[in-house]
Amino acid sequence: MAVTVEQQAPLVVLDESDRIVGVGAYAESQFRPLLGEVMWDCFPGSKPLFKPYYDSARRTREAVEFVQFYDGNVARVRAVPRSDGQLALYWEPLARLDTLTLGGLVTSLERSLELLDDRRSGLDRQDARKTLRIIEGGR
Amino acid sequence: MSNQAIGAPKGAARDAYVVLDEHDRIVHVSSVLHSDLGHWTGHVLWDHLPGARDVYGPCFEEARSSGRSVEAVVFYAGRLKRLTALPAADGLAVHVERLAELDVTTLGTLTRSLERIEAELDGRASARRDPRAPASLRALP
């Protein structure tokens, strides 16, 4: 099921301190105002979800690809280390939680959980699924 | 059905309300909500809340048909809310009280917020002391 992120331009480029130093043309509206900021300061709670992968890419000098849930979205992320120490991030949106109604939430959360094939998020995934079953059982 | 015939809403919900005509058109917004919803006056509620008719509508209809105040706990737009619909001569007064909110930041925060919603409903079910009452999110539509 793995589909390599195929964007031509990175979403953002980080320096060695995870500071945003480059923004792709299609992400300018969201990320241009964040230039110079540390990624984790801009997106609370995201550091433990993403940084281990970015560190791995830098350490091994090889691209890392993973699927992660953050801020109601599931995305496939590809982190590509550059020779200058910077890290180019490519982003492919896969799913978004629909929180409008309970039915939409149940359906979109199940879909999101299916997409998360990452072992590290397994425990949280199980917890979310367990609670979701309680909700579904009461519908 | 989670709807209950009740008395007037309590606390902040008492001051936060809109009044709907028989076509669910907003004919009055209370001063507490005026900055947020005042510009909806004269509009049909459902035009601004996609998908909400199936969620809120049964509570409104029950209040209108019974002529009594009806309370329902519903989930809409990421929030668990207590609706209170009070029929009156000038329309249906709808009070909304936020009970809990989804936090979709991470799977962890999402799970905890789902648990808070469940706990909120558990607490309400217990408070009713009705052995037939649902003890989980069964109160959701």
Image (cartoon, coloured by chain):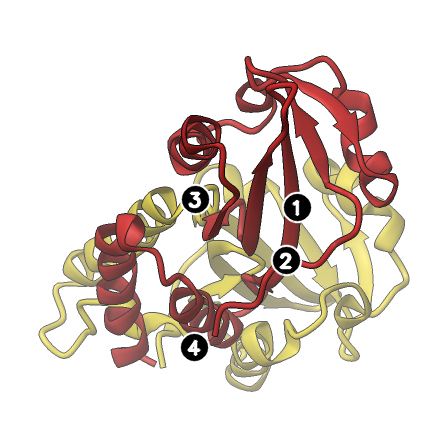
Q: CA distance from mark 4 to mark 3?
A: 23 Å
Residue A90: give its label: 1
| Distance between mark 3 and mark 2 Cα atoms | 53 Å
Q: Which percent across, then down, holds residue A134?
A: 23, 70
Q: Which residue is mark 4?
A: B141
- Residue sitting nearer the eye, B90 or B77: B77
Residue type at numbered disc 3: Lys
Q: Nearer the viewer, residue B131 or A95?
A: A95
Inspect the image, locate mark 4, and give the three-letter code of the amino acid beneath it. Answer: Pro
Q: Are marks 2 and 4 in contact (CB under 8 Å)?
A: no
Q: Horizontally, is A110 left or right of B111 in the view?
A: right
Residue where numbered disc 2 is placed: A5
Residues marked 4 and 3, same chain: yes
- Circles 2 and 1, Cβ within 8 Å, touching? The answer is yes
Work out whether disc 3 and disc 2 sit on a shared chain. no
Q: Is residue B53 left or right of residue B11?
A: right
Identity of the amino acid at label 2?
Answer: Val
Question: Which amino acid lies under the numbered mark 1 shown in the image of this protein?
Answer: Tyr
Disc 1 on helix, strand or loop? strand
Q: Earlier in the sequence, mark 2 or mark 1?
A: 2
As drawn, the chain in yellow is B
Q: Is residue B112 above or below residue A106?
A: above
